[in-house]
Amino acid sequence: MTEPVLVVEGLNVGFPSKAGVVQAVSDVSFELHAGEVLAVVGESGSGKSVSALTLMRLHAKSTRISGRAVFEGRDLLTLSDRDMRSVRGNDIAMIFQDPMTALNPVFSVGSQIIEAIRTHRDVSKQAARARAIELLDLVGVPEPRRRVDQFPHEYSGGMRQRAMIAMAIANEPKVLIADEPTTALDVTVQAQVMEVLRDVQEATGSAMLLITHDLGLVAGTADRVQVMYASRLVETGGVDDIFYGSRNPYTRALLDSIPDLVSDTDRLVPIPGNPPSLLNPPSGCPFRPRCSMATDTCAESVPNLTTVGDGHATRCHHADLLVTEGAS
Amino acid sequence: MTTLDQSSANALEGLADKPKSFGRLAWERFIHHRLAILGLVGLILIALGFIVGPMINSYPFDKPDVLSRLQGPSREHWFGTDEIGRDLFVRTARGGRYSLAIGLLSAITATAIGTLIGSVAGYFGRAVDALIAQLINLFLVVPALIVLSVFALNFGSNWWRLAIVLAGLLWVRIARVARGVVLSIKEQEYVMAARAAGASHLRIITRHILPNVVGAVTVEITLLLGSVIVLESTLSFLGLGVRPPDTSLGRLVADAKGNIDNDPLRVLTPGLVIVLIVLCVNFLGDGLRDALDPRARSERGSGDD
Amino acid sequence: MSTTAGDALLSVRDLVTEFPIRAGVFRREVGRVQAVSGVSFDLMANETLGVVGESGCGKTTLGRSLLRLVPPTSGQVMLGDRDITTAGRQDLRELRREIQMVFQDPYASLNPRIPVRDIIGEPMRIHGVPKEEAADRVSDLLTRVGLLPEHGNRYPHEFSGGQRQRIGIARSLALRPKVIVLDEPVSALDVSIQAQVLNLLDEVQEEFNLSYIFIAHDLSVVRHTSDRVAVMYLGRIVEIGPRPSIYEQPSHPYTHSLLSAVPIADPRRERARRRILLQGDVPSPASPPPGCRFHTRCPIATDICRTEVPKLREVPGGQQVACHHPLAPGETLVDITSR
């Protein structure tokens, strides 16, 4: 396999608050390889978005961070502001959830793409403009020559998202971080935008970190999957391993609880209870209070991430009990 | 649901041990806001000073004592005396009481008018709202001081008239806030749910809309108080406010300005009192705004990660 | 529709709901948006009718129009033998006992200043249910939705999103309605909580003998909960029929595209799938295309589609479709337009 483009080791992110430290990310480690799509799946509070924002160093000054994130030989977490700015939008780019607020309404779309280009490359305005038109065409915005001068409110939701993708890939980044890129879009537009992302990624060979809560999206796009729960990584593996051979009770419970478009299940099997507080997490395994297989051991210590297969690891004291019975 | 005992059930559901009403949450947030408490305490102390002070220092505010004129601060005359020998501390206290009284009366009146009109505009919408909104804009555009001066000249010769005149202009600020809140609440799903249950307009306004308007309006009142004090002081400074021998803080500044080169302290003192009052009021308003901000959720609320 | 209004619990005929577009200083009306453009359907006892569509299709406005929370412009909504759209104030209050609503946003659908027991009890108080009986019912309802009676003393902000939705459901049950309109009841909830609430809705429907109108954009959720499904596009129903017909043998090109766009949590299926990608975005409801409103994005549109509005007609699969070129059972759009 190719060399990893990004290596994250032991990432911890905590937000100090009046009531104590809210530990949003605990001990997350992973590798991202060129050309692959790594999906980070989790519900709200799992820490998936916070991890990404922290890697881009878009966090508040008071945030407590530890760990390493090595990209091209440098640790992103310790870079100076100046160095980090040359990385953002250039080597690592981010696509956000809500295209309306991610684009500045008072500037034309074209000028925002041009700005993204000229911040990092020494090119003339004409050259940048030509490139912007090229990019808009690449992402499927119709009539790019006319649209390049239009404002975000003149674009529809799907087009705005495409424009954001254009901005993100303008400088051919090595890593694309997409944070819930299609959540705010209609399902037919979602399909279009995901298609664009796929094409773009193939064309540039960049790695993509796809953050989402939508398991369907993951099944259709990801090569590898990382499941997060209550600030921790609870399972990681190839997409088939995760969907057909999961060795983690949370992942399984999640898969069992979602309504399916094709199968005719009578009743869903919900996960009882609620996600835990990040301020006062339960002792031991964070999923314990809701887990059907929990024992005393689970309350005593947080399980370690153990390898259970080729590129497949899980965080569970009883992973051995979950040897698969076949596809769901 | 299985039979669980109360506290483990609460723990399972993640609830705190005792119910916390919105009011209680707001109170807790307010108490922790240090500046607000400082402001509140400051105001109370100042008010007390105005009331109790003259009782201790028993010089009458209007009795001239030409022999002791233009003295600096001393043990008998804490703030010194003015050009006809009146004790300045007592005059400041009296002036301060007037300023506060005018401020409070006009704030309350403005609130009553503003909340009513603003809420009606917001709730009934369309034509009524369009009309009232334009009226509000008109009032906001008019330069307050000039209009007030005209009114004060002809109409406001004693303190409560002045307060009414001020209220007559400033109610629009409250109305604007109330209208905005009502407009946004009206569209909230819980109001729709009440309508779906068959609630009458009256019920919706009193039970669902007004309690939520109170929060925003309370904040605006404290800010209004500050503005009133400054406006009144300005009017009095221009000679249009309270008539002698009565005085107000603004008037005291006016009286002292002639001698500012020799006796700057005499100008600064009432000026400083004005500043302190407005500052305390603003801190208080800040604290109230933070405490009553509906967007601040409880410690339990889930957020995005 | 082959059933008469007498059989159906709720009967909607040619419902139109328009919104004025206002501009200028005096907010004069400069145009109208037809959010709901002539919708007709029946709802039987104990059945769930799912209503799906994307943004701008009018499904939320439809839901609100049924309860007259938004005034319908024309058409009828018959509950029994009375028309909600023209009922007088007294009648309307009566009618509102029979049809209730569960809202989408768990954070905006409960008044933050009122304790939970009053939120659930309010409908009863409005309709004069005696205090003691109301209090008992509130306790019962709280237990029924999976909370404790003691929780009635608490305030909405103390609960999580899923719990708030349960409170919203309890409130909708207070008056023992016959029909409940659910407007995206689980969209704002986490995946693992959605299943809890969906199961609750299922149980409650059986126990209380309810009919549901389940409005959602998530086709998987609608598939799971509904007996019949209506697909809406720009204010109109384009296809309506039994769930298996719609999901397994869809007839309208839009339904085909919609279904093919929904991601499935099954990697092998996803890899084998071929998607139909529609061109462009949904047109604005303020200026809908003439003729068949879908023709601007339809891969099989012809001249007649641009000029003539198709009517709902029954097709072999068992459902009704509004299309000039409905697809036969087993025919897929992928055959016609290869990708």
Image: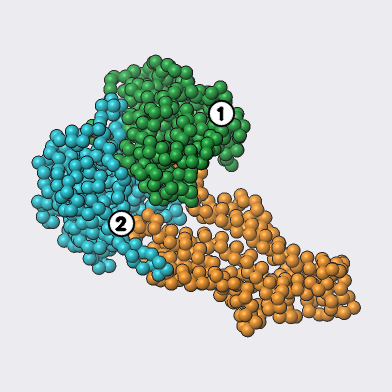
Chain colours: A green, B orange, C cyan
Residue A293, x across and y down, in percent? 38, 24
Label 2 close to label 1 by CB (< 8 Å): no
Q: Secondary structure at mark 2?
A: loop
**Pointer 1 indicates a residue of which chain?**
A
Q: Residue B258: x percent and y percent?
A: 81, 73
Q: Residue at x 12, y 48 (%)?
A: C313
Amino acid marked by disc 1: Leu
Where does the image place residue C198, in percent across and percent down from the top left? 30, 41
Image quarter for residue B269? Answer: bottom right
Q: Please name the residue shown 27% across and 58% down the image.
A: C34
Is residue A60 something one can see in this rendering? yes
Q: Which residue is mark 1?
A: A76
Q: Which residue is mark 2?
A: C286
The answer to whether dots 2 and 1 both sit on one chain is: no
State which quadrant residue C336 falls in: top left
Chain letter for the residue marked with disc 2 in the picture: C
Q: Residue C72 versus residue B65: which sits nearer the camera?
A: C72
